[in-house]
Image (tube, helix red, strand yellow):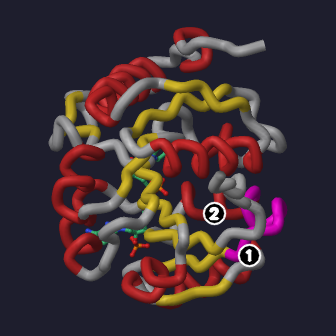
Amino acid sequence: MVSIEPPNFADMRIGILGAGNMAAALGTHWVRAGHEVMVSGRDPGRARETAERIGGQAGDWAQAAQFGEVVLLAVLADGVPDVLAATELAGKVVIDCTNAVVQGRWTLATPAMAESVAAKSGARVVKAFNLCPDELWRQTPPPVAVPLCGDDPEAMDIVRGLVVDVGCVAVDGGGLERAALFEATAAVVIGLAVQGVEPRGILPVVG
Ligand SMILES: NC(=O)c1ccc[n+]([C@@H]2O[C@H](COP(=O)([O-])OP(=O)(O)OC[C@H]3O[C@@H](n4cnc5c(N)ncnc54)[C@H](OP(=O)(O)O)[C@@H]3O)[C@@H](O)[C@H]2O)c1
C-alpha cells in the first residue's frame, strides 16, 4: 500500500508581487506565522522599505515569483499584464487578491481577472482576500471570514492554511469560475463603502 504524507504547509516561501497596502498587510501576518516572504514592486526602494517593515526580503518581480512556493498577486489591476509578462508562474500556487474596479463607476475593467491570470500564466490560481479593505487585513486577527475559490485541491488546501495563518476562518467559495463573482462583489462593496455603508454589514459573518 502506498502511503501519502500529508502536505506540510508550515514555513513556506511566499513571493509577493506588489509592495503596497495588501503586500504589507498580508505579508505581516505570514512573517509572524513563520513563513519567509519576498516582496517585489515596480519601485525597488518601495519594495525594500515594505520588506524591511514586515521582516521579509525584497526582490524584483521575477525573483519573487521564483522564490515563492506560493505567490500573492497584489498589484493594481492595470499592472497585471506587465507583471505576468515579467514572471514565470506556470504550476505555482497564486493567490489573486486583485480587483479591477473602475473608480467612480464601480464596475470592473477586467470582468474575470483570476481566470484570465490562470489562463495567461498556467498558475494554480486561488481567489482570496479581495473582499475587504487593507485596514481590516492589518488587524490581528482580521475580524472577517475569508471566502476563497479555485480549481486545484492542493492549492486550495495551501491557501486555506495561509488564511488560518492570517488569523481568519477560510470559507469555501467553489471553483475558479466563481472568482468573477467575488470580483463583482468587491466592486459592489467598494462602491457602497464610498457611500458610507459598512462593508461587513453586507458580507457573511462566520461566528
Ligand atoms: N487596499 C485594499 O484595501 C485592497 C483590498 C482588496 C484587494 N485589493 C486589491 O489588491 C491589489 C493591490 O492593492 P494595494 O492596495 O496593495 O495597492 P497599492 O498599495 O497601490 O500597491 C500596488 C502595487 O502595485 C504596483 N503597481 C501599480 N501599478 C502598476 C503597474 N501599472 N505596473 C506594475 N505595478 C504596478 C505598485 O507599484 P508602485 O509602488 O510603483 O506604485 C505597488 O507595488 C489591487 O488589485 C487592489 O484592487 C486592495
Cβ–Cβ below 8 Å for labels 1 and 2? Answer: yes
Q: Position of residue 186 (x, y in %)?
A: 39, 29
**What residue type is disc 1 on?**
Arg
Disc 1 secondary structure class: helix
- Local packing at callout 2 (Cα closer than 10 Å; few below 14, some 14-19, many 20+) is many
Q: In this view, does 6 lie to the left or right of 16?
A: right
Measured as percent of width and height from the top left, residue 77 is found at 28, 54
Q: Locate residue 50, reporting x and y percent.
A: 63, 75
Quadrant containing the C terminus is top right
Residue under the point 41% across and 66% down: 92
Disc 1 packing (10 Å; few <14; some 14–19; many ≥20):
few
Ligand 1 resides in the quarter of the picture at bottom left
Q: Position of residue 144 (x, y in %)?
A: 68, 27
Q: Is mark 2 on a helix, strand or loop?
A: helix
Q: Which mark is residue 24?
A: 2
Any magenta on residue 159?
Answer: no
For image coordinates 30% across by 69% down, the residue present is 90
Disc ID at residue 53: 1
Q: What stretch is highlighted in magenta?
A: 29-36
